[in-house]
Image (cartoon, rainbow, N blue to C red):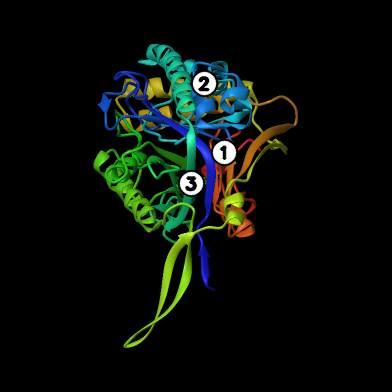
Amino acid sequence: MNVIETPQSRVRAGVAWRDITPPVGIYHRMWGAALHDRSTGVHRPLEAALLWIAPEGVSDERSRRGEGSAVADDVGTADARLIVTLDHCILDRAESDAIRAAIAARTGLLPQAILVALSHTHGSGWMSRTRAEYPGGELIGPYLDRLIAELADAADEARRAAVSARIVYGLGRCDLAAYRDRFDTERGHPVCGFDPTGPADDTLVVARVDTADGTPLATIVNYACHPTTLAWDNTLLSPDWAGAMRQTIRRDRDVPCLFLQGASGELGPRDGFVGDVAVADRNGRRVGHAAAAVLESMPAAETRFEYAGAVLSGTWIGTWAHRPIDERRRSAAGVWNWRDVTIDVPYREDLPTIDETERRRAEWAEAERRAAASGDEREVRRCRAEGEQMTRQLARLRALAPGSTCPITVSIGRVGDALWIFLPGEFYQKLQLELRRRLSPHPVLITTLTGDWQPGYFPVAEAWGKGIYQEVIAVV
């Protein structure tokens, strides 16, 4: 082999960034075992990073003439995609739809071209208007209204800023993610926690987005690991490990960083479920340093690494050089092709009913009142956790599409040498491992929790029948 090609894309790109930290005191309880309801402070800001991406071909001059306009022909909107990354765990489908509608009205994009991807940090709290009756819940509605407006502004900013850009892709490894489907032999049942005997995909895909003249625009990190360092003892608003990851990268490359959560259904930090934010920061720096190492290894865009011949110096030295790519490779880097595919997945036959779930939730609420009256904090924690599971089950059941199948819409893009895949729900690592195996040598960025958390988990076939958490709450 005398040539090593660097995977890359030629596009138009624009970026925008916003601090989307909710107000302190907002409803924060994300964990069934938590004894608090309101957030008490901020660990690190929650962030939104947006990337407007479109095929190269619309001149900068035409873009400037299109300022203030959402006319597709003026600003290349017809073929564009907008990736919106948010530091939130779960958003109701109505909120995701409202975000897309507001951005579509402001930019001219079709709603299906707006990809709202969640980092899935469990330190953000559950931002659902259905939680308005809880302490701090009265702040959720006004916060979400502001968030929608700010994202529409940011999307328009990214659209206006779009210029000719180059994306270079690199592959790294990080061992933060660990297998978390464990069987507790002492208690005789499965638990969700670090299992050192299980497999864990350590693939880290990093992309560097620069203008055509090399000015940094954005960094993209695609990694599969639940942001569950912080759990029930944490009362601070937090992006979990993603916050320190971004800070680490920005020390050398001070531009927005988009974190794309991979297929992490059974993957989480080996050191997690704690209340200490220092652990979250340490976890994040591990991913950040791994990503920074990949960035340092990347060559300049529109180059290839070629064998340059032998030089006699005591012995014959084989030399390599970075040289410009030819027109064929430039054309391949400019390929742009997106499509949406909807797959109907059958619901499981033993789904609980809404009436049954409401009855069980009421029973656990009564048990919690009895435990509180007797001063049994451990039993209060257990009852709150069980009741919370029923509340979340109700939310899932009420949000399901009618019928016997659940429609799953997947957005797939061929962007130069890379494949970008966005889909809802939480998939196991097998999805990304198998797709990357089949599609090699193309870089594959797989982003879950896009558009909607529903229908929740997609455990692999061999995980069923073991009573694990992901199986218990799965609806398909």
Residue occupying image coordinates x 54% and y 32%: 59
The residue most toward the bottom is 314
Disc number at residue 65?
Answer: 2
Instruction: Residue 197: give x, y in percent of width and height.
Output: 45, 62
Q: Amino acid at mark 3?
A: Ile
Q: Position of residue 119 (x, y in %)?
A: 44, 36
Q: Residue at x 55, y 25 (%)?
A: 360
Disc 1 target residue:
56
Q: Mark 1 or mark 3: name the one nearer the start of the chain.
A: 1
Q: Residue drawn at (29%, 25%), measured in percent from left and top?
A: 375
Alpha carbons under labels 2 and 3: distance apart: 25 Å
**Mark 1 crowdedness (10 Å alpha carbons): few <14, some 14-19, many ≥20:** some
Query: Quick one: label 2 or label 3, which is nearer the N terminus?
Result: 2
**On screen, 150 above or below 212?**
above
Question: Which amino acid lies under the numbered mark 2 shown in the image of this protein?
Answer: Arg
Q: Which label lies toward us, 2 or 3?
A: 2
Secondary structure beneath label 2: helix
* Kind of residue sitting beneath label 1: Glu
The answer to which of 139 and 103 lies nearer the viewer is 103
Between label 1 and label 2, give the one nearer the viewer.
2
Q: Which residue is mark 3?
A: 167
Disc with the residue nearer the chain's start (1 vs 2)? 1
Quadrant where the C terminus sits is top right
- Against 336, residue 4 (above or below) is below
Of 241 and 48, the residue lying toward us? 48
